Image (tube, rainbow, N blue to C red):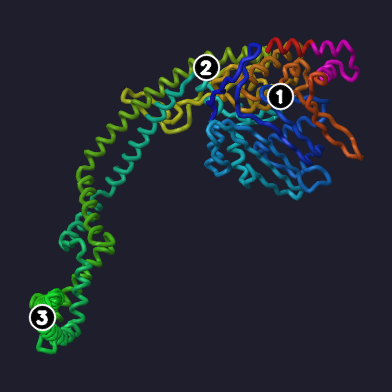
Amino acid sequence: MLDQCPRPVKETEGSFRYDLSMLKSIRVLNLAVIQKAVVEFGPGLNLLTGETGAGKSILVDALGLVGGDRADSSLVRSGSDRGRVEAVYDLRPDDPAVQTLLDRGLAAPPAVGEDVELIVRREIKASGSGRVFVNDSPCTLSTLREVAGMLLDMHRQHDQQSLLSREYHLWTLDRFGGHGGLLDRTAEACREVGRAVQRLAELRELAGHRRTRMEELKAQIREIEDAAPQPGESDRLAARRRILRNLDLLHEQLARLEPLLDEGEDSAAGRISAAASRVGLLAEVDAGLTPLLDQLEKALIEVQDVAGSLRDYQGSALAGSGETPGPALEKLEARAALLEQLRLRYGADEGEVLAYRDRASGELATLTGLDDEVRKVEEERQAAADRYLERAGELTSARKRAARRLAPAFRTGLKELAMNHAAVEVRFQAAAGEMVRSTSGAEQVLSLRGGERAEFLLGANPGEPAIPLAKAASGGELSRVMLALHGVLGKTVAAGRILVFDEIDTGIGGEAADRLGARLKELSRSHQVLCVTHLPQVAAYADSHHVVAKAVAGGRTRVQVVALDDERRIGELARMLGGKKITAATRKNAAEMIQAAGREA
């Protein structure tokens, strides 16, 4: 999901621009003080500026809603029955989110090479309920979170997202170190151990009641073999039983049939014979009637054959084995009852009963040689454990080497973002789980991801020990930590995601602010970046710049979001530089900042 590589489409003034999945626009209706706002975003670095309290964070909260945040009915604008947020994305056809949408039936398969439009809509009712739509189809909040989680990476004040997860730390370290192959081999060895352990448990469970089970299997096999059922035997017995139960009826009808078919001149055979004689006389006169004579002679033969077959049937099938009907029927009923018992116990028909006997014989053979089988599987488990410990050990060593490279690079990135005294450490702890031991006696936790977990620690103040990020960094610092981490990882990790930063510039200014802007600009070459900022040094790097402002009309406060052209952008930077009083000097300074940022980018 995070490994898609951006496609370079052109190079201008020394910087690549990438063809990425991106957020095209967001439309907000009746949310907090926003009556209606539409913001259209572009590729690269998108910045939102405005006075404190103008409503910038409301737009970020709106993005959070289309990203799957829980909705609060208090967000609905006073006097409205509902609020709505709609986001429109343009997704690359190879974006993993597209496949998820297709799997959920939320998008149509795109034409070859064409992008996919994704429209996400959240409706929040003042009454407290809400609805989620993806491409106009209702869906659950969990589905929205799954899809949005592949696209959006939000970093807000007090936002405890992926950066605070130790799972994310380990994932980051493995991606930084390029451990994909080692992870795959370790996971496969772990699964081999798991399969052997499961097989051993099954065999040992069998061993616990082996004697009882063996006696049971022997009795079942003996019962089936003594009965000696034959495939299809029940059907044949049923047919024979029907005959014996209706023996008088059969004899009566056969007795009536014989004179009708071939006994005397009035029988069918006698009448056909007489007719054939007369047609024979006619054929002597007209040879053209000879075929009719042939047909009558064939009919006579057919009738005589039927009569003969019925006599044979009466003399053999009905006579049976010479037993009287009563005892013969009793014998058949007893056999049928025996076969029914077998079918009730072992299968729907004789074929399944015999198949059960074969399975039972195989299980009996396994139980007979169970000790040997247990020893064999134990050897397989140990061999798998040795492979796992070898591969997990290689992964552990690789992770420690990667940590030694990541920590200083991480510190350098933080220093550039005005966290000059930040100390970064990577702490390893044993993973939770069952221990596995090698032939040599070495032990390791059995886990698909190896035997340890990693956690990033931050010492934000000199002389203080490094502690977990959740305790060490403020909201603004967390955003800068994430930005520094993205800078260290570069385009190989999480390339193509839409990154949202709010209040990332808290507590910095001057040269550090300029470095922050340059870092965001660099990051926007492999991601679409949306950022709320109060710093003109950062705003100077924007590819797309919107200003958020409040206005009062008709006694109600409204938020306006305006896309800035070059001239108005200079004015906004001048405001950020000089406050309400904007002079020619501040405008000149603002224009020079934008020009300088363009050269650096």
The answer to whether 506 is drawn above or below residue 297 in the figure is above
Q: Earlier in the sequence, mark 3 or mark 2?
A: 3
The image shows residue 567 at horizontal and vertical percentages of 82, 19
- Front one among 329 and 242: 242
| Label 1 Cα crowd, 10 Å radius (few <14 / some 14-19 / many 20+) | many
The image shows residue 169 at horizontal and vertical percentages of 55, 25
The image shows residue 266 at horizontal and vertical percentages of 13, 89
Between the C-alphas of marks 1 and 3, the distance is: 113 Å
Q: Which residue is mark 3?
A: 285
Q: Type of residue at label 2?
A: Ala
Q: Is residue 314 visible?
A: no
Magenta region: which residues? 570-591
Q: Which residue is mark 1?
A: 46
Q: Earlier in the sequence, mark 2 or mark 1?
A: 1
The label on residue 403 is: 2
Majority secondary structure of magenta residues:
helix
The image shows residue 428 at horizontal and vertical percentages of 51, 22
